[in-house]
Image (cartoon, rainbow, N blue to C red):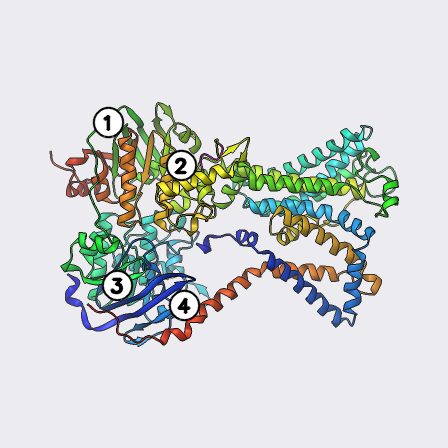
Amino acid sequence: MDNKKSVLAIISETRIIHILLSIILGFVVGAFFLLIMGLDVGAAYGRLITSVTSVKGISYVIVYSIPYIMTGLSVAFSFRTGIFNIGAEGQFVLGSMAAACVGILFGSLPSVILIPLCFIAAMLAGALWGAIVGILKNKWGINEVLSMIMFNWIAFYLSNFIAGIPAIHSDGTAEATKNISDNASTLLSKELIADLGLCPTANWGILVALVMMLIAWLIIDKTTLGYRLKAVGANKSAAEYGGINVNRSILTALALSGAMAGLGGALQLMGMGSRISVFSSQEGYGFAGIVVALMGCSNPFGVFFAGIFYGALIYGGSKLNLVGAPTQLINVIVGTVVLFIAISVIFERLKYVQIKKKPKAAAVQSGKEGAEQ
Amino acid sequence: MAREYIDMNTPVIEMRNIVKKFGDFTANDNINLTVHKGEIHAILGENGAGKSTLMNQLYGLLKPTSGQILVNGKAIEMNNPRDAIAAGIGMVHQHFMLIQPFTVTENIVLGTEPTKGPALDMVTARKNVEELSRRYGLAIDPDAKIEDISVGMQQRVEILKALYRGADILILDEPTSSLTPQEIEELIEIMRSLTKDGKSIIIITHKLKEIKAAADFCTIIRQGKYIDTVDVEKVSENQLASMMVGRSVTFTVDKPKQEPGEVVLDVEDLHCNDYRGVEIVKGLDLQVRRGEIVGIAGIDGNGQTELVEVITGLRKGTSGRILVNGADVFNKLPRFGFDHGVSSIPADRQKHGLILDFSVEDNLILQNYEEQPYSKNHLFNREAIFAHATQSIQNYDIRPQNSERRTAGTLSGGNQQKVIIAREVQNDKDLLIAVNPTRGLDVGAIEYVHKYIVEQRNKGKAVLLVSFELDEIMSLSDKIDVVFDGRIVASIPGEEATENQLGLLMAGGKVNG
């Protein structure tokens, strides 16, 4: 039965203990590299911890983690429904651009209308980008992983193209879009930020991420929709036999997953950037989402915390150069963590082999003649 | 008889005092087995009795907790199947170990591929495979992909795979569960010619008839315990059955006479193609009425599988009409048929019947998850689902009890089938289609399945039974339709049919009168 399980199924079963172990091992490997470079491990990791434990540091971490939580939720949702949404990157980019267009073109609308409008536009853009891949898969059987990787690039250039349209492009010399209207901003008020001593980009996007976490959990675990999507993911044939419309389910799963990534793009724009630069390379929020989904065991609650952790690594890592350590160290740690999570299945196997080896001594104990009739 | 070739002096396999524990559970409790050269030795036991566990230890897949295994008089420690293969043991598993997207040839030669320099020599491989299949009379299509061929052909590929590796001792785990009566006879012939060559065969089965027909000796296991090893010639089927189950078993089905009512399923001039696009159902007509069981008898590959797939909406037909309670379900989605009165026990319970990674309770609501009380406003009511599962487990004797939240994949084959039957019978539809409903089940479980099917008929449901087991068709059906080459070639009242007559019709022959 085990050989019928997909790799994704195994990954989503990875246990929390493996995750924690992998994280610790990631830091051990990171320390190893620091030692090679002749740097003080204590100072570097100390800096990492102090930079994310002040009030300001915490606010930075939260702000940094919002996009990662969203793309993490997107990928985790796809894992649970048997798809691998490697296209969260493109969905994120287009969601961000859709929100930017609405935020720029309808900037005069009041916040209560404009902000939801931006959210909706972003989710639709992300959902559409996911759904197109689903249609290609359903109609012509095109592998979704391949088309999603290509769709990431299409999104990338489409975003750059839209940024160049006169109505959207910055009036100044910057290679970027105009700034979105203040009415579309999710930033906390300046007074509040000053009073609490938060980071300048402190915004309430994290609340949206929290709500999306709950919605993802509700859909996956509590609703008939989730049942349908999971059934198709686990056994397409049985789902079809049971009367579930398989093609529609795949489309729905991809669209919902895309909507979450798209919303992540909007939250990033409306809380942090306020405009979108012309990209020279992919930003990687979607790909980071895969890491976050893995670390979160594809569980919405787990993903939320994994997203915060990832945000802390990224923010804390950016301060490492203050103690002379390269910021790339974080990439080493993250890469190692992912590697160990990916092979954590092997931990299980090793355990199994040991159990199997035990009865060696017992095998010779019996010498009685076998029953012969 | 195979008897004359047995060399009683040379035990090729001796398993002594084998104990296998999984945690607290003892799967094998002090089991002994001796197999001589040239012998066909049957291992008999119910589902979950520990037959497969015992054989998996012989094949190196599991290690005994205690006990000893001797091959040709030498104690051997089997750490993995490679050790077993090196010792000349080959095994054909009940659940096929085939790579779905690979061709038949590729699967058979896998691991021992002929090469030409550094490259695979698939031409030679194909030739070898064809030769082997001719030699043992096991018909296969060497170029077909596993995912496209019938369960019966997959089984033949598995048997060929073991033979290709030149095993002297063959373990066959339920080898006949998917073969037609003719194929079973052929297989028995093959087994006999193999033993004549000095090979030994261990066959795990719960089909008493085959043990009587093929085996020389039979070791019976019940609930992990060794019961007895008997000379097959000296015991009756009934004795074997009661040793296996621990109580006396009835083989006959109690079926009161009743007049069938109006037509529920009406298939008219149905045509459809198989996976290769070749027409396989060629203008088939079929009617099933209320309160009757119509059995479709036929050799695998004559269109019966495709017929059911078209009726249940899993396959598109090319032309024809299928009425269920007057509604045309031809080329509609499975849900449409379900809503108009079609329920079915599918042929492949692990592919179509169950979602193995889902819990038993979730599998029990596969078609009803959107109905009250299981869900309301798209939100699940977990208590209702659990209660439904508890009740189903009780009413349909699904084991282990308290398996509501266990994944379906952890149940034994017989209990997986009971989950499907519980679901489909409780769906309470006018038409029940059952395809090989007792495949791989032991007599105890078969008794239950037959009881439920007849119960449906007695309640006035229309039942369409497709089975490769002629006994099953003959004992259950009110009317037997024989399918040959995509058409119904004869329709015989159940009580008048004889095995000979059916066998002849299934092979495309004519019956006088």
Q: Where is residue B31 in the image (x, y as percent from the top left)?
A: 30, 66
Mark 1 crowdedness (10 Å alpha carbons): few <14, some 14-19, many ≥20: some
Q: Which of marks 4 and 2 is nearer the N terminus?
A: 4
Relative to residue B486, is residue A336 depicted above or below? below
Residue underneath mark 1:
B260
Residue that lies at the very extreme toward the left in this rendered image:
B513
Q: Which of marks 2 and 3 is nearer the N terminus?
A: 3
Relative to residue B5, is residue B278 depicted above or below? above
Instruction: Assign a secondary structure to mark 3.
Output: strand
Q: Which chain carries label 4?
A: B
Q: Is A153 on the left or on the right of B106, as rendered?
A: right
User: Residue at position x 34%, y 38% from top?
Assistant: B306
Measured in 3D between alpha carbons, the distance from the residue under mark 4 to the one under mark 2, in whole angstroms, is 41 Å
Q: Earlier in the sequence, mark 3 or mark 4?
A: 4
Residue underneath mark 4:
B80
Q: Is A235 on the left or on the right of A134, as rendered?
A: left
Q: Which amino acid is tagged 2?
A: Arg
Same chain check for tags 4 and 2: yes
Q: Which amino acid is tagged 4?
A: Asn
Mark 2 crowdedness (10 Å alpha carbons): few <14, some 14-19, many ≥20: many
Q: Nearer the viewer, mark 3 or mark 1?
A: 1
Residue underneath mark 3:
B201
Q: Which of marks 1 and 4 is nearer the N terminus?
A: 4
The quarter of the picture where the C terminus of chain B appears is top left
Same chain check for tags 2 and 1: yes
Q: Which amino acid is tagged 3?
A: Ile
Residue underneath mark 2:
B315
Instruction: Assign a secondary structure to mark 1.
Output: loop
Q: Which chain carries label 1?
A: B
Q: Earlier in the sequence, mark 2 or mark 1?
A: 1
Instruction: Assign a secondary structure to mark 4.
Output: loop
